[in-house]
Image (cartoon, coloured by chain):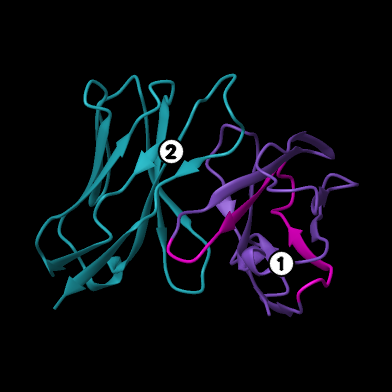
């Protein structure tokens, strides 16, 4: 596709439920980033992939958060046993190489009830 | 501790006038700065960037100024248009050897009044 695509756009999860958020980056983009944006805040870095390798996961807030990009293209962010504080917009971004400006998807708004 | 600060949550400017959005940073290792624009229910869109070796970068109606000694940058939009109404995020990174992601400010909501 022309841009970064994320699905679902909206997700409501009950506390304790596991969720999986999908990101389809721009074709050919090597670098892929996940960010978390809480209400009224700027995006906060979660993790970075170069192709299939997860080179940086320093921003993942707990071991309930897990990301993968097994074939170096589509990526999935999984959150286990969701908590209310996980409610946020999760943004995926990709770039051709790490130092290029990243293109963002529309995000997935996760609400944990 | 916030490393990138946008101290004005909102800014209202009349159409046709200049909009000036400000950003301060505390990490002296940052050497690349970006501005992103965000409309509701959309992801951030890259607007303009500047490397620390420059003090000004211009792209059409948008100019970014960098004052390294003051750890301050600003985005100027001239003339302001109704379509410029959006949230503007300042972001920074260390190009080589630093963290892989961008560090963002909290954003400034720019409202262009007709």
Disc 2 crowd rating (10 Å Cα; few below 14, some 14-19, many 20+) is few
In screen coordinates, is A36 left or right of A12? left
**Is A70 above or below relative to A112?**
above
The image shows residue B18 at horizontal and vertical percentages of 12, 56
The part of the chain drawn in magenta is A15-40
The residue pinned by badge 2 equals B1
Which one is in front, A54 or B76? Answer: A54
The residue pinned by badge 1 equals A83
Which residue is depicted at the point 21% across and 26% down? B70
Label 2 secondary element:
loop
Q: Give the total number of marks visible in the rendering.
A: 2
Chain of the residue under label 2 = B
Q: Is residue A17 magenta?
A: yes
Which residue is depicted at the point 52% across and 41% down? A101
Label 1 secondary element:
loop
Which residue is depicted at the point 68% across and 65% down? A5
Chain letter corresponding to the colour cyan: B
Q: Is residue A39 magenta?
A: yes
């Amino acid at each position: 596709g022309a841009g970064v695509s994320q699905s679902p756009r909206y997700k409501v999860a009950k506390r304790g439920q596991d969720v999986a958020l999908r990101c389809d980056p721009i074709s050919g983009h090597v670098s892929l980033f996940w960010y978390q944006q809480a209400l009224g805040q700027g995006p906060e870095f979660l993790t970075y992939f170069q192709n299939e390798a997860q080179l940086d996961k320093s921003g993942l807030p707990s071991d309930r958060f897990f990301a993968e990009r097994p074939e170096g293209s589509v990526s999935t962010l999984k959150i286990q046993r969701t908590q209310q504080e996980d409610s946020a917009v999760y943004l995926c971004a990709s770039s051709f190489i790490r130092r290029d400006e990243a293109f963002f998807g529309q995000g997935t708004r996760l609400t944990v009830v | 501790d916030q490393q990138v600060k946008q101290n004005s949550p909102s800014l209202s400017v009349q159409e046709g006038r200049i909009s000036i959005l400000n950003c301060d940073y505390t990490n002296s290792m940052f050497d690349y700065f970006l501005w992103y624009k965000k409309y509701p229910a959309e992801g951030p869109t890259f607007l303009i960037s500047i490397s620390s070796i420059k003090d000004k970068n211009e792209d059409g109606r948008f100019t970014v100024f960098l004052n390294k000694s003051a750890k301050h940058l600003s985005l100027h939009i001239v003339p302001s248009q109704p379509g410029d109404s959006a949230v503007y995020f300042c972001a920074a990174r260390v190009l080589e050897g630093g963290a892989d992601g961008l560090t963002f400010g909290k954003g400034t909501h720019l409202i262009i009044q007709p």
